[in-house]
Amino acid sequence: MSSKEQILAAIKKNKPKATVLPALLSYHTEEIDRLIAQFQQASMLNGGKTILIKRIEEIPSYLQVHFDKNLQVVSLVPELHGSLDITTVQDPHDLEAVELAILKGTWAAAENAAIWMPEENLSHRALPFIAQHLAVVIESRHLLRDMHAVYEKIKIDESGYGVFIAGPSKTADIEQSLVIGAHGPRSMTVFLLTA
Amino acid sequence: MVENKTHAAAAEEFLKDEARTHWHDDTLWHVRTKRDTAAQKLPEWEELRENASQIKDYVLSNLDELLVQFEKNAVANGVEVLWAKDAQEHNDHVYRILQENDVKNLVKSKSILTEECGLNHFLEDKGYDVVDTDLGERIIQFNDQVPSHIVMPAIHLKKKEIGDIFHKHLGTDAGADDPQYLTEAARIHLREKFIKANAAITGVNFGIAETGGFVVCTNEGNADMGTHLADVHIACMGIEKLIPRAADLGVFLRLLARSATGQSITNYTSHFHRPSSGKKLYLILVDNGRTEQLGREDFRNSLKCIRCGACMNTCPIYRRSSGFSYGSTVPGPIGSILSPGMDLKKHSTLPFASTLCGSCTDVCPVKINIHEQLYKWRQVITKEGDAQPAKKWSMKLAGKILGSPAWYNFMGKSARIALKFTPDSLVYAKINAWGKQRNLPEVPKESFKEWYNKNRK
């Protein structure tokens, strides 16, 4: 018998009596202002920052003040221009010098500020991790109450890979002291379009 | 190594440094209070726990069908699925994959399963340099230790000690112990490893039967840095890590990080379904004693564990004895009900490393009846004759006295008189293990029964 057959046979012999799968949970949504406030609070606790904007055109002036424009910027948001054309990059190792990656989010949970980013929104799977800083643009109408609501909207196997990003790379492995910038982004800025 | 010591003997080592014991206790209690704050923010918390528990009950009672469904979907996604009965077969699979793909440099993110299988030492013996990339795991790897906690592997070390370790291994300034500075040094060191790696090994937090994919949670982003840069990804998964539906992730992700550290979610929750073009994705499904545990009616619930570590943070024994005193891959209350199933002789003292206060059961996000299982293991162990001899005869005697009202009244009276005249040197003598770390309360003049008989009018 193969290991697979042995394992399955042992389970069949040892498993308890069948039980029923409970129904999926879902909760009533909340007012948009409350969702925005919850998102901001959660994002801050995760080590990130939320900037409320009315128009996407407000982003470049913010970036100019906060990031060095001489360094590499990759933008996957059509309205914003970067200095590196991602379509010219074949090997993700060549993204090592990226200072800032600007990506478009899809759906987000207000309870924990987690934003769903399927592979198509990343260009390279490594991009949001290897970049020194990360910015994500998301529309406030795509804010949902909780994870149950987000999983209702997305299809996790539509892309080969997808990730919830809720903040910058962080660690507290040295005496529980929070340090931002463990391996990946040293900051995460979420531009929340509230128009 | 503490492997063959009893829990009490190993804990004694840790307790020698009283200041460190208090610091360890306070640190973990702080994490526990953060968990409480996070849980109390959600009015539906108890509903989530109940739902998660029922989902896991369903998984255990349908595990064979779900695994078949999971494998079928994963294979259709382009994942190569391998099965391993035990640690040896798991390690052999990993080694063969590394050989076949001509892997030279290897990075690893946190996986308690590979720790359980002894993968690092196995590969090191074959000549591989296994680089653990979770900061806490890298620290203890430098220090030649195993994790003392499943979520916070280096929680037993102080920053001064980590500074010394980094000075030795990474050339940081002597005496420097600023966490920001030390983390930056690790970042530079590990980026180089990520860039050079040909293969990345990860654990699995949840496998999804419905889609054939799996989820890995980190705060550092180290699992993603490794897997997206390397050509080969090997994911190692215990067969009990399965959930039926994609939507069930909503329940478990809401519970996991809140229970573990009081965060609302880890900053990265990665869903892997298909390999990038030109790359390879392997998934190893490991039994290693799990099917046997499934057959133990009283203990099968322990397989519902999602490895959040909440039971460790809340446990008065764990907090004051540290993870190493358990001598098992998973320490603390949950480890004390899992490990006896793997090796009853070796871990026979673990179910006794508990006050049975039940706090572990109260905080468990999937409602495992941990303290009841600890009690049940004690009965199994005592029956099999593995309890400590001193404990055994004293328990027998206690059983006789507590079982007979006449004996109880007589012994109580005698003890109250005797204790009054017993010198401290005898109560706290070496032979009386109970007297260590404990003070006797003042002896009352009369028993409650005597007081009640006098005052009931």
Image (tube, rainbow, N blue to C red):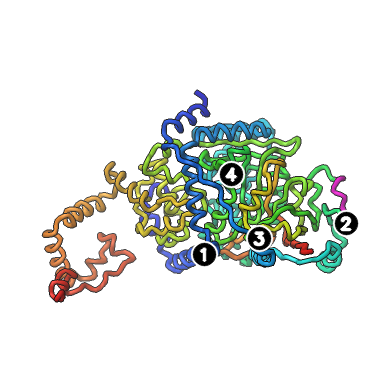
Residue B308 on image: x %, y %: 52, 53
Name the residue: 77% across, 64% down: A194
Residue B106 located within the stretch drawn in magenta: no
Q: Is residue B305 left or right of residue B95?
A: left
- Identified by mark 3, the residue type is Ala
Q: Chain of mark 4?
A: B
Q: CA distance from mark 4 to mark 3?
A: 26 Å
- Identified by mark 2, the residue type is His
Numbered badge on residue B204:
4
Tag 2 secondary structure: loop
Q: CA distance from mark 2 to mark 4?
A: 37 Å
Numbered badge on residue A110:
3
Residue B75 on image: x %, y %: 64, 31
Q: CA distance from mark 3 to mark 1?
A: 17 Å
**Prevailing SS of the magenta stretch:** loop
Numbered badge on residue B375:
none
Tag 1 secondary structure: helix
For the residues beneath circles 1 and 2, the answer to whether they share a chain is: no
Q: CA distance from mark 1 to mark 2?
A: 43 Å
Tag 4 secondary structure: loop
- Identified by mark 4, the residue type is Val
For the residues beneath circles 2 and 3, the answer to whether they share a chain is: yes
B291 vs B438, nearest the viewer: B291
Q: Which residues are magenta?
A: A81-88
Q: Is residue A171 left or right of residue A118?
A: left
